[in-house]
């Protein structure tokens, strides 16, 4: 698999879209955390609970990991677009066929793409680690890895699920325009509508939607879920997220293994 | 002679459309095997199935006696299928590095194969800047990586200028002389006739005929007896025409002005016609047994219509 990933790296390292989006993502991390920090500093002392403490402790030792991971999760559409773009390039250039003709198994091709997604998820997780370290220094918060390990794990899982969902859309639609539109409309609009519907019709199930299952892992600091209700707990949500990730892998591999290319 | 590729009752349906209908034939080792058919006849579909990018509806195929198309087998085959498929934003050399890495070949071969197709000078240019002919030549270079014993070419001279076409044909002949088996799909009859030792003709997904090029040329259409085409001429062409019409075995005589074209059964020969005319007092000034072209044979078989 390492050798296959090296081949994948040869494909993408000189690809301008990949380079630009990687830089954009890193700039985006700085901007979005800065926005969160700015809003937080302006609200400090204004939003207080019954005990007189600040209602939201976004940059405390316990919450800073969740704050960084939660805020940067809004940027996951950027690597999602890259994944769609990379896969549909292969379809448009017919290189997905040529790789098979040259000697890759069909499964090798799709598993290499999934491995690339895992690598990007690791990179995103590392960037969240670095961003948290920097923010701890900026806010004079003690940097303790203990509470962060779990949140970094959730960050990896969330990124992996977002990117697998993007890959699945690219695999099924094979047109970048359609895949982008579905990715954005579903993620930014349709899922909220479904959450609202599910929270009223099947309470609890609103957390087990294709992207929300990942979002529920990293709730807004101080909350246990979303505006549509608390999630059923970290263990159940983790099991749900792993199940969805497994489902996405199964569907992508099955589609690629048996369909005409 | 051992068989490199064997197709057994391959069928491929796209909904109600039968793209391939019960195709069976063998490709002998060391041959240049042409798959000839009108546009849309199923040639690329057939090659796509044996290279595992399309799934057959039913039937089976064997590469060197092994069922299906394993990835290890495909690494031993150089294939250009339909169009040159490369990453547009990468240079020729980087594209070939990807192909070589997948095939498990050394990067040292890249300059060698680029030189063979006259692209070494442009190895650092992006694929997107290449002309159609250069893209085609790069695809051929990619097939040569690792010097495979089997090469599969789908319309290999697409987009090439006349000099490029001649070069690629010469390259294919040269590869065949080295003992390599070449499977080539084409709708260019001249190309198949000049390069191939064997040919299969398909139309609307149905195998019409298969054999050596000579066997296919010599075979009679199924609804007709085998015929010869002979061109003759004499000083008195009208008398010659009347005489030949009385000769048993002559099926038709066509006056082209300066000569007569006779279509006759294979019971006649040029010498028997010459003897007959001489005995009847006419001395022939021209007698030519016309070689049947693959084009004529192809049109006889397919009815001269495109499949699209």
Image: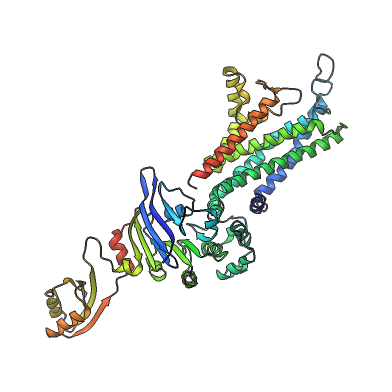
> Along the horizontal axis of the image, is A78 left or right of A106?
right
Above/below status of B11 relative to B34: above
Which of the image's four quarters has the N terminus of chain B? bottom left
> Along the horizontal axis of the image, is B290 left or right of B89?
left
Q: Residue at x 71, y 26 (%)?
A: A219
Residue B226 point in image, percent of width and height: 23, 68
Residue A142 is drawn in which quadrant?
top right
Q: How is the image coloured?
A: rainbow
Q: In the rendered image, is residue A72 in sight? A: no
> Along the horizontal axis of the image, is B111 left or right of B232?
right
Q: Residue at x 44, y 56 (%)?
A: B62
Q: In the rendered image, is residue B152 in sight? A: yes
Above/below status of B52 relative to B242: above
Above/below status of B32 relative to A229: below
Residue B56 point in image, percent of width and height: 43, 48
- Pick the residue in front: B237 or B225: B225
Residue A105 point in image, percent of width and height: 55, 50
- Pick the residue in front: A196 or A211: A211
| Outermost top residue | A50
Above/below status of B189 relative to B55: below
Residue A231 point in image, percent of width and height: 67, 22
- Pick the residue in front: A238 or A165: A238
- Pick the residue in front: B252 or A248: A248
How many numbered marks have been drawn onto this rendered protein structure? 0
């Amino acid at each position: 698999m390492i050798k296959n990933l090296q081949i994948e790296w040869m494909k993408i390292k000189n690809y301008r879209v990949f380079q630009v989006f990687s830089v954009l993502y890193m700039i985006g991390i700085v901007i979005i955390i800065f926005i969160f920090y700015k809003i937080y500093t302006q609200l400090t002392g204004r939003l207080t609970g019954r005990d007189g403490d600040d209602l939201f402790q976004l940059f405390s030792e316990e919450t800073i990991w969740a704050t960084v991971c939660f805020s940067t999760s809004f940027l996951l559409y950027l690597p999602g677009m890259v994944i769609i773009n990379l896969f549909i390039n292969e379809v448009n250039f017919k290189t997905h066929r040529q790789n098979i003709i040259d000697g890759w198994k069909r499964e090798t091709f799709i598993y290499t793409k999934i491995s690339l997604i895992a690598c990007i998820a690791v990179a995103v997780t590392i960037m969240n680690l670095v961003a948290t370290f920097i923010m701890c220094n900026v806010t004079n918060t003690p940097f303790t890895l203990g509470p962060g390990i779990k949140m970094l794990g959730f960050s990896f899982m969330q990124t992996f699920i977002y990117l697998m969902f993007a890959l699945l859309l690219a695999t099924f639609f094979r047109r970048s325009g359609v895949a982008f539109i579905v990715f954005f409309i579903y993620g930014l609009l349709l899922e909220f509508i479904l959450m609202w519907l599910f929270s009223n019709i099947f309470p609890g199930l609103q957390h087990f939607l294709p992207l929300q299952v990942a979002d529920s892992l990293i709730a807004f600091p101080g909350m246990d879920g979303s505006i549509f209700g608390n999630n059923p707990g970290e263990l159940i949500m983790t099991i749900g997220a792993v199940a969805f990730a497994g489902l996405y892998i199964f569907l992508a591999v099955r589609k690629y293994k048996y369909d005409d290319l | 002679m051992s068989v490199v590729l064997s197709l057994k009752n391959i069928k491929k349906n796209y909904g109600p459309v039968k793209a391939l209908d019960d195709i069976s034939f063998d490709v002998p080792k060391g041959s240049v095997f042409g798959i000839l058919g009108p546009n849309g006849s199923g040639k690329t579909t057939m090659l796509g199935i044996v290279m595992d990018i399309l799934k057959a509806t039913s039937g089976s195929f064997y590469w060197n006696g092994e069922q299906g198309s394993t990835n290890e087998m495909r690494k031993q085959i150089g294939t250009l299928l339909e169009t040159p498929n490369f990453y547009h934003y990468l240079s020729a050399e980087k594209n070939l590095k990807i192909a070589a890495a997948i095939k498990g070949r050394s990067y040292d071969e890249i300059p060698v194969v680029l030189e063979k197709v006259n692209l070494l000078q442009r190895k650092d240019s992006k694929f997107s800047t290449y002309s159609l002919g250069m893209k085609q030549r790069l695809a051929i270079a990619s097939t040569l990586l690792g010097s495979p014993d089997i090469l599969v070419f789908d319309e290999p001279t697409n987009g090439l200028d006349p000099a490029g076409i001649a070069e690629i044909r010469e390259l294919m002949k040269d590869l065949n002389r080295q003992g390599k088996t070449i499977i080539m799909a084409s709708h260019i009859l001249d190309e198949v006739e000049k390069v191939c030792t064997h040919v299969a003709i398909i139309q609307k997904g149905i195998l019409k005929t298969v054999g050596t090029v000579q066997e296919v040329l010599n075979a009679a259409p199924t609804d007709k007896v085998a015929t010869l085409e002979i061109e003759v001429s004499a000083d008195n062409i009208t008398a010659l025409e009347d005489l030949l019409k009385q000769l048993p075995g002559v099926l038709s005589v066509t006056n082209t002005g300066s000569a007569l074209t006779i279509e006759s059964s294979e019971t006649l020969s040029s010498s028997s016609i010459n003897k007959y005319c001489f005995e009847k007092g006419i001395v022939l000034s021209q007698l030519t047994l016309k070689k049947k072209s693959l084009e004529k044979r192809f049109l006889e078989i397919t009815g001269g219509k495109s499949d699209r």
